[in-house]
Amino acid sequence: MTETITGREEDYLRAIFNLAHEQEIPVAPGELVARLGVSSAAVSRMTQRLAQAGLLRRTAYQGVSLTDAGRRHALRVLRFHRLAELFLVRELGYDWAEVGETVDGLEHAMTEELAARLEARLGYPTSCPHGDPIPAADLTLAPVRERPLTTLPVGQRAIINRVTGDRAMLGHLKEQRLVPGTSLTLLGRAAVGGLLTVERESGGAGERGSGRARERESGGAGERWSGRAVERESEVLPLSPLVAGAIFVRRPEEEE
């Protein structure tokens, strides 16, 4: 197995890890085509190269999966990527919905020392701005206790743990204040069409379920929370299956 891999190879390993939902589930070549915006021929060539390097397994009629070595490489890239996202949002005021595209590529140039310094500067965070867990320095990943919002029983309250999607989806979720830490209750599920109706509780701005919003104030590094409590009314929102599918929730008793 080669110890040094290219940035593009790292992109593939990260994509496979994310598409497999952090489990040992084969990823179909077509999923990589859609995720990375490349041709089927390019996916075939790259996966063959990574398999020869001992970083993934190719299974006929099923897809590809990471080997232990490939998983460690993917976790290293994810650690760098998510720390960089959080630093740009928290310290430099980058937009929460667009930072992922800004960071793409930066993780390939990051070193272990820089990652350690960022981690310390940020107070040893456990998740990125979108709620994805940040691998530890030893490349371990804490268990994720969550479920898709679409599987939540009607009448049950939950807290948004993680959101996914492209820039447009993340921007929409931010506009609706459906971000990690927001509390909501599933009020209903349409029998036809899959439309969900939720009640988003006040304080829906990453408050980790406190039930109150915090007033924002301008600062040199973008918007910050002032700490002054500002009561807001709860709001009932209809969510399409596409939007609901981008939200993952946890139970209130699992609140940090």
Image: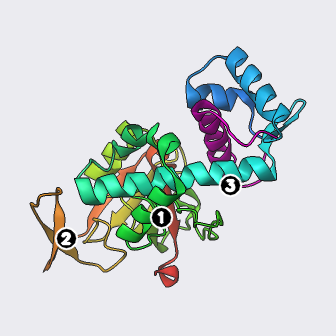
User: Which type of secondary structure does the marked residue at label 2 adopt?
Assistant: loop
Name the kind of residue labelled 1 in the image. Ala
Is residue 183 among the parts visible in the rendering? Answer: no
Residue 201 in picture, x, y percent from top left: 30, 71
Is residue 137 among the parts visible in the rendering? Answer: yes
In-front residue for pair 196/158: 158
Left or right: 163, with 23 as reference point: left
In-front residue for pair 179/87: 87
Counting other residues with Cα less than 10 Å from the Cα at mark 3, is it few (<14), some (14-19), or many (20 or more)?
Answer: few
Name the kind of residue labelled 2 in the image. Glu
Counting other residues with Cα less than 10 Å from the Cα at mark 1, is it few (<14), some (14-19), or many (20 or more)?
Answer: some
Who's the residue at 67% across and 36% down the image? 5
| Residue marked by disc 3 | 22
Is 4 contained in the magenta span?
A: yes
Is 94 contained in the magenta span?
A: no
Q: Quadrant of residue 223?
A: bottom left
Judge depth for marks 3 and 2 and give the one in front. 3
Residue 250 in picture, x, y percent from top left: 52, 71
Who's the residue at 44% across and 59% down the image? 128
In-front residue for pair 123/243: 123
User: Which type of secondary structure does the marked residue at label 1 adopt?
Assistant: helix
Who's the residue at 50% across and 65% down the image? 249
Structural distance between the alpha carbons of marks 3 and 1: 23 Å
Q: Which range is magenta?
A: 1-25
Against 168, is 231 above or below?
Answer: below
| Residue marked by disc 1 | 116
Judge depth for marks 2 and 1 and give the one in front. 1
